[in-house]
Image: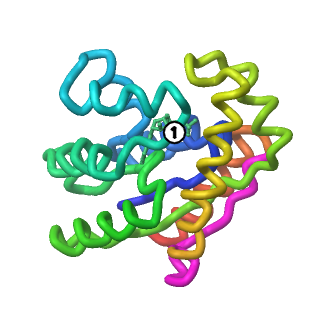
Amino acid sequence: MQIVLIGPPGAGKGTQSVRLAEYLQVPHLSTGEMLRDACLRKTDVGLRANEAMQRGQLVPDELVEEILFERLEEKDCQGGSILDGFPRTVPQAVAFDAWLGKHQRPLSTVLELRVNKEELLERLSSRGREDDNREIVLARLDQYDELTHPLLDYYGKRSALHVIDGQGSAEEVFAQICSIVDARK
Ligand code: ADP
C-alpha cells in the first residue's frame, strides 16, 4: 500500500509512520530524515539542502524529488511504503502523481494528521532537534500553512484524503489510522 501522511511539524507524523510501516510491513520513508542524513554525509543533495533546512525553510522540490524517487525505485519499496513528509507542496504532489502513473503504482490513501497550533508549539518546544528552536519552528509552521496546506485541497478533491484527529495519545491516533487503512486493504 502506498500511503502518504500529511501534517504540520510536531503533529506526530514520524511516530505514526513508523508504527504504520511496521504494521503493514513496508518501508517508512521520511524525506526529513533522508535530507538530514544527506547533510551529515555532505552529499551533493545534502550540501544544496543544508542552508534551507537550517532556516526552517523547505528544500527545493527538485532536490527532494531526486532523493525520494531514487529511493522509491529500490526493491524493498515495490510493495508500497509510508511517506512521511512528502509531498509537501502542490508541485511535489503533481510530480509524485506523474511518478506513480509512470510506475503503475496506485496511491492508496492520504492521511492528514490535524493538531492545533498551541499543542504543536508545546510539543516542538520539548523535542530538542536542532531546527526546533522557537523562531525556526514558527517559520516551519508558516511554511506549512502557506505551501503544504493547499495540498489538502488537491487530495481532498480526489477523495483520497482522510482526516485524523492527532490530538489524542499515540495509541488513540494509531487506532484511527488503522481503522482507515484496514478498510482499504
Ligand atoms: P517536520 O515535519 O517536523 O518539519 P521533517 O523531518 O519532516 O520535520 O522535515 C525537516 C525539514 O526537512 C523541513 O523543515 C524541510 O526543510 C526539509 N524537508 C523535508 N521534507 C521536505 C519536502 N518534501 N520538501 C521540502 N523540504 C522538505
Which residue position is annotated with label 1? 57
* Residue 38, quarter of picture: top left
Mark 1 burial class by Cα count in 10 Å: few <14, some 14-19, many 20+: some
Quadrant occupied by the N terminus:
bottom left
User: Could you tell me which residue is drawn at 50 percent across and 43 percent down?
Assistant: 17
User: Could you tell me which residue is drawn at 22 percent across and 75 percent down?
Assistant: 101
What range of the chain is rendered magenta? 155-167
Tell how many labels.
1
In the rendered image, residue 163 lying in the magenta stretch gets the answer yes
Q: Secondary structure at mark 1?
A: loop
Quadrant occupied by the C terminus:
bottom left
Q: Which of these two is toward me, 147 or 4?
A: 147
Q: Which of these two is toward me, 59 or 114?
A: 59
Q: Is residue 33 above or below residue 89?
A: above
User: Could you tell me which residue is drawn at 22 percent across and 51 percent down?
Assistant: 69
Disc 1 residue lies near ligand 1 with CB under 8 A: yes
Q: How is the image coloured?
A: rainbow
Residue 61 x/y as whole percent: 34, 52
Residue 3 x/y as whole percent: 43, 59
**50 on left or right of 88:** left
Q: Which of these two is toward me, 19 or 57?
A: 57
Q: Label 1 amino acid?
A: Gln
Residue 172 x/y as whole percent: 74, 46
